[in-house]
Amino acid sequence: MARMSNLQLHWKTACSIFFSSFIAGLILLFLVGHLNFQYGSFDPSQLFSIYLPPFLLIIIFSLLLTLWGLKRLSKPLSQIEQISLALPLLSAKKYQQARLLLSETSINNSDQEVIDLSNITNHLINVLDQLDQHGRLRNQQVQIKNRELRKERDFIKSLLDTAQLIVLTINKKFEISLFNDYGEKITGFNKDEMLGTNVARMFPASHWTEANIHFNELLAGHQRIAQQDSELIDKNGLIRQISWLHSRLEHDNQQAVILSVGLDMTDKKEAEKRIVWMAEHDPLTDLCNRRKFIEEFEKSLRMAIRYHHQNTLLYLDLDQFKDINDTSGHRAGDELLILVARTLKRVTRFTDLVARLGGDEFAILMPESDVDGAITLAKKVIHELSTIQLEYGAVQHKVSTSIGIVHFPLQDASIHELMGFADLAMYQAKALGKGNFHIFSVDDRTREQLEARVLWKHRIEQALEQDLFVLFYQPILELDNNKIEHYEVLIRMRDPHTGEMRLPGKFIQIAEQVGLIQQIDHYVIKHALKQLGLLQKQKPNISFAINLSGLVIDTSRLLPLLESTIAEYQVDPNGIIFEITETVAVSNLQQAKAMMQAIKALGCRFSLDDFGVGFSSFNYMRELPVDIIKIDGIFIKNLDKNADDQLFVKALVDVAKGLNRKTTAEFVENADILALLRGYGVDFGQGYYIGRPQPDLLNTLAWSPPLSS
C-alpha cells in the first residue's frame, strides 16, 4: 500500500504540473489570438495553420515541464517518504531501523529543508533512544532495588520470626501492628487474633499500670528505652515470666511507634527457684538443710527477743542409726531418713520449721511455744517415729530418737550456744535410754558443762585474736627406707598467763559446739602451709598431714582459702595431706566425696583417719577418693599381744594394697609393734616410739630407734 501511494502521489504531481502548464499555455495562446483578432487581420482559414504549432509547443512544453518537475521533486518526495516511514518506528522503539532509513535520505541530498527535517527527525530519534535507555536503566535499578528490599524484608521477617524473642510494635492507639511467629508460639495466639487489638491483653492488670506509664512516656519522647519484668497469661491460661524491653521508634512521617521485645524467662526463673531451693534444702528428705535452718534460727531468735516471745528448739538424734547403715547399707538408711522426715512434717504445725542438719540429726523450730507444747510435740514425735518399721531384706528396723529441748531467748545465748545447749540436753536424754527427751535448764546438772563451755569459748576466741595457738609436728616414719619426710600437724593452745600448752582434747569439741571450729581449721591451714612453703624450698619432698574437722565439709570457704594460700606461699600441693575421720566422712558420704574430689583437683592428697572404729566397713575404702588409710590406734597399741588385732590389721593392709591405697599405723609404742607392721607391709608408722609431737621438725631425715629401746 505504501508503494501504491507513492505512485499515485507521483502521478497526481505529474498531472498537476502538466495540466497547470498546459492550461497556462492555452490561456496565453487565447490572449494572443484575442489581441490579434481585435487589432489585426484574422483569416479563419489560417486558424489551424497559425495556432496548431503553438498548441503543439504548449503540449510539448507542458510535457517537458512535467518531466522536469517530476525529476526535481521525486528525490525530496522519496526522502520525505523515508522520514514518514521512520516516524512510526519510533513508537515501536525501533530506533536503529529508523536511523537506517534516515541515513538513506542524507546521501546526495541538496534540499536544505529536507536535510533539516531529517536532522530534526534524527535528533528526535537520539533523544527518544536516550530517554528509552535511561528509562530501561532506571527500571533495572528500580528492579534491583526492589529485589534488595524484598531480600531485606524477607531477612528481617525471618529474623523476627526465628528469633527466640517476642517482637511486637504498638501504635499511638496502643494497638498491636506487628507480631512475630515466636510470639505466636509463646502466647498461643496467632497474628490474626493479635493484630489490631489492644496491647493491654499482653499484661495482667497488676503489671499493666507500669506498662501503660512506660508506653505514654515513650510516645511522648520522655524516654527512649524502658525495661519491665511482667507476667504473661497465654492462651491456655498458663503464666509465663517475660522480661520486656520497650523502645521508641520513629517512621519517616515522624509518627512514633513502640517496639517491644520480650524474652521468655519462665524456664530461667524456675531454674533459679530450683537452685535456691536446692541450696536451702536437703536433697534426700526435702527438708531444710543446716544452712537454711541457721538462717531461720537467727531470724527466730531476733524476733523472739524483739517481741518478747518464747520459742523452742527441739534437737533430734536417731538412736543407733549407724547400725542400720552397717547391717543393711546406705540405701536402707536413706529410706529410713525419708520416712522420718515425712513423719516429722506430718506431726508438726505448719508454722514449725523442720530441718535435717546432717546424718541422722534433725531439728524443729517451734515459734511462740511454751513448755507444755514442746513436751507434747516431743512425746508425739517419739511415739510416731516408734511406729515406723522398715523391712529391708530379712532385717526389720525400728526407729527411736533422743530429743534435746531448749527454750529461747535464754540469757544472751547465741544460736550456736543454743544449739550446744540442745545438744547437751539430747545427750542427757540418751543417758536416760532410747526414746526419751530432756529439757535444758541452766539450773540443772548441765550448769557446770555450760560454764565450762562459756569459759573455753572465751579462751578459743582469745587464742584466735592473740595468736595463742601453736602448731606441733609429729614425725611419721616411712617404713621401707627408715626416712622421715612426713609430719602430722597438731594444734596446742598456749595459756597466756602460765605458758602451759593445752591439748586439743580440751577445746576442739567445744569449738565445734559453739561454731568456732572452722576458724581453727583455717588458722591451722594458713600457718601450716606458710611453714610448708618455706621448708619445701630446702626439702622438696617434705609433706604435712593436716586434720580437718567434721564441719569443714559443709562450707564453701575451704576451697578458695586453699587456692589463695597455696598460691601465696608457693606450696607444692602434693605435699599437703588432709586427714578426715572415717566417722565424719561416712556420716555425709556424698558431700564428703565432693569436697575431697575438689581439693584433690588442686593436687592435694587425702588420708582417712581413725579407720576401723567408725563404721567398720571396707567398702568406704573403695568409695572415698583417699590416698592413705590411717589405722586407728586401738588396733595398734596392743598389736604385739592381741591376735585379733593382728588379723584385722593384716587383712586391712591387704585390702588397701589391692585398692592401691597406702597405710599408716598410729600409736606405734615399741619395737615389736614396729616389726610386725613392717612384716605386714604397712607403709608408714606414727607414735611415741618413732617421735613425739614437737614445735620444731627433726634435723635429719634418717631415723634410728631410741636408745631406751
Image (tube, rainbow, N blue to C red):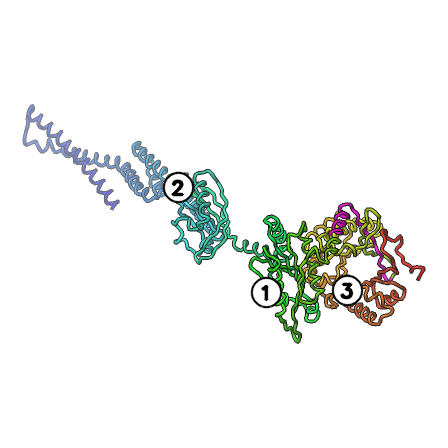
Q: Is residue 580 above or below residue 122?
A: below
Q: Identify the mark at residue 342; answer none if there is no mark.
A: 1
Q: Which x, y percent locates residue 416?
A: 68, 53
Report the mark closest to the observer, 3 or 1: 1
Badge 3 amino acid = Phe
Q: CA distance from mark 3 to mark 2?
A: 99 Å
Compared across the picture, whether 384 is left or right of 564 comes to left
Q: Which residues are magenta?
A: 454-480
Point out the tag, 3 or 1, that comes first from the N-terminus: 1
Q: Residue at x 47, y 57 (%)?
A: 238
Q: Which x, y percent locates residue 142?
A: 41, 44
Q: Identify the mark at residue 326; answer none if there is no mark.
A: none
Compared across the picture, whether 366 is left or right of 99 comes to right
Q: Quadrant of the C terminus?
A: bottom right
Question: Residue 331: in sight, yes or no?
Answer: no
Q: Residue at x 45, y 38 (%)?
A: 221
Under tag 1, what secondary structure?
Answer: helix
Q: Which x, y percent locates residue 321?
A: 68, 67
Q: Identify the mark at residue 611; answer none if there is no mark.
A: 3
For this rendering, which residue is in front, 134 or 334? Answer: 334
Q: Which x, y percent locates residue 265?
A: 52, 52
Q: Residue at x 60, y 48 (%)?
A: 306
Residue lying at the far front of the rendered structure: 443
Badge 1 amino acid = Arg
Under tag 3, what secondary structure?
Answer: strand
Q: Which residue lies under the disc numbered 2?
A: 133
State yes or no: residue 462 in magenta: yes
* The quarter of the displayed image where residue 422 is located: bottom right
Badge 2 amino acid = Gln
